[in-house]
Image (cartoon, rainbow, N blue to C red):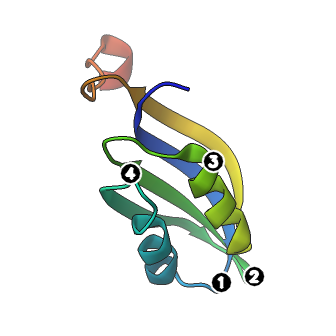
């Protein structure tokens, strides 16, 4: 697989572990330089979160296994960046609306 430098994941997780604990675990996986976890929606038993990961060489398999071990499920991969550098999205008329 290519050199993954950024992943944005839509994840459903139980209330425990906390997003702080989850971010700490993910940040320790080799190749991961930074982790951002945001709560998108909160239910009585489940949090829908967005996880953004950056690093020189993210190991998606290890990251997905760690997420699963914490009782969470990846709903979708919403963004991926590979290559020598991360390319930002260009602003188009469609995005500006």
Q: Earlier in the sequence, mark 3 or mark 2?
A: 2
Q: Considering the numbered disc 1 on the image, is that residue within a helix, a strand or a loop?
A: loop
Q: Quadrant of residue 43?
A: bottom right
Q: Earlier in the sequence, mark 2 or mark 4?
A: 4
Quadrant of image for the C terminus: top left
Looking at the rendered image, the disc whose residue lies closer to the viewer, 1 or 3, is 3
Disc 2 target residue:
45
Give me the C-alpha separation between circle 2 and circle 4.
Answer: 32 Å
Disc 1 target residue:
15
Evaluate whether residue 41 shows in this view.
Answer: yes
Quadrant of image for the N terminus: top right
Give me the C-alpha separation between circle 1 and circle 2.
Answer: 6 Å
| Callout 1 touching callout 2 (CB < 8 Å) | yes
Residue at 55% x, 37% y is: 78
Disc 3 target residue:
61
| Callout 2 touching callout 4 (CB < 8 Å) | no
Looking at the rendered image, the disc whose residue lies closer to the viewer, 2 or 4, is 4
Q: Residues within 10 Å of mark 2 (few under 14, many from 20)?
A: few
Give me the C-alpha separation between circle 3 and circle 4.
Answer: 12 Å
Q: Residues within 10 Å of mark 1 (few under 14, many from 20)?
A: some
Give me the C-alpha separation between circle 3 and circle 2.
Answer: 26 Å
Looking at the rendered image, the disc whose residue lies closer to the viewer, 1 or 2, is 1
| Callout 3 touching callout 2 (CB < 8 Å) | no
Disc 4 target residue:
31
Q: Earlier in the sequence, mark 1 or mark 3?
A: 1
Residue at 68% x, 59% y is: 65
Q: Earlier in the sequence, mark 1 or mark 2?
A: 1
Which residue, as the protein is rendered here, is positioned at the far front?
A: 30
């Amino acid at each position: 697989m290519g050199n993954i430098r950024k992943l944005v994941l839509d994840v459903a997780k139980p209330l425990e572990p906390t997003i702080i604990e989850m971010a700490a675990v993910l940040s320790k996986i080799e190749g991961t330089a930074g982790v951002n976890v945001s709560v998108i929606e909160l239910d009585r038993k489940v949090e829908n979160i967005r996880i953004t990961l950056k690093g020189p060489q993210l190991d998606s398999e290890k990251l997905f296994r760690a997420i699963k071990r914490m009782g969470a499920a990846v709903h979708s991969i919403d963004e991926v960046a590979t290559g020598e550098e991360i390319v930002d999205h260009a602003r188009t008329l469609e995005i500006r609306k």
